[in-house]
Image: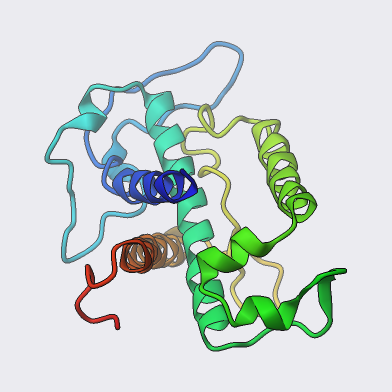
Amino acid sequence: MGRIVLALLLAFGTASAFLSKAPLPVAKRSGTSAMVMNTVKDMPGITAPIGYFDPAGYSETVSPEAMLWFRAAELKHSRVAMLAFVGWCVNGLGVHFPGQLSSDVSFESLSKMAPRDAWEAVPEQGKLQIIGTIAVMETVCEFIKPHYTKAGTASWPPMITPRKDFFSWEPLTGADLLTQQNKELNNGRLAMIGMMGFSVATIIPGSVPVLP
């Protein structure tokens, strides 16, 4: 069951990368100065060689709020996939923390297992702590104002704002900011595809020819 859930989450994350690319009407809301972007083509993520891509027309049938929700979901899945990809590679190389994860599970023993097997070996209390931490982060995110489904162009759905350089607190703006946002989205999309490949290769041996 866990494998199926993982596969569905990764698939949804990747699919959401292609849902944010079609025209939407302008929509103002009472009680706020924020305005939904008048077209999804104003959103970051439309880059060569694919460019504008919405063959199923999903973005033409949903509300502006739903499109911003899709983008926020895409960002979250992208970041999780990038972390998962790095973690999968690190685990595969046998790199691990010193000491014990619990009284009867060492980090060294986990490093010798396949990633999914390593997760299964984590004690239930450890799994609950991880899931609980994620739940807290999600809850905090939902209370950010303005909410990411109503932020419009005023605040791109929760995203770290890059700085001009390591020693500067001045954020990037304009074309420089768009370039960095496109890079994050493209890297995240590749990571989601990569994680689906890793997952399928372990669930169905031989399904990915380039992997042993």
Examine the image and state in which quarter residue 99 appears.
bottom right
On screen, 55 above or below 66? Answer: below
Examine the image and state in which quarter residue 110 appears.
bottom right
Q: Residue at x 16, y 59 (%)?
A: 50
- Estimate the x, y position of residue 140 in percent, counting from the top left: 73, 38
Q: Residue furthest front?
A: 104
Q: Is residue 179 visible?
A: no
How many labels were placed on the picture?
0
Which of these two is toward me, 136 or 122? 122
- Estimate the x, y position of residue 168 in percent, counting from the top left: 70, 75
Q: Is residue 9 visible?
A: yes
Determine whether, in the image, residue 114 is placed left or right of residue 178: right
Determine whether, in the image, residue 197 is placed left or right of residue 165: left
Q: Quadrant of the C terminus?
A: bottom left
Examine the image and state in which quarter residue 62 appears.
top left
Q: Residue at x 47, y 38 (%)?
A: 153
Q: Residue furthest left?
A: 55
Q: Residue furthest top?
A: 30
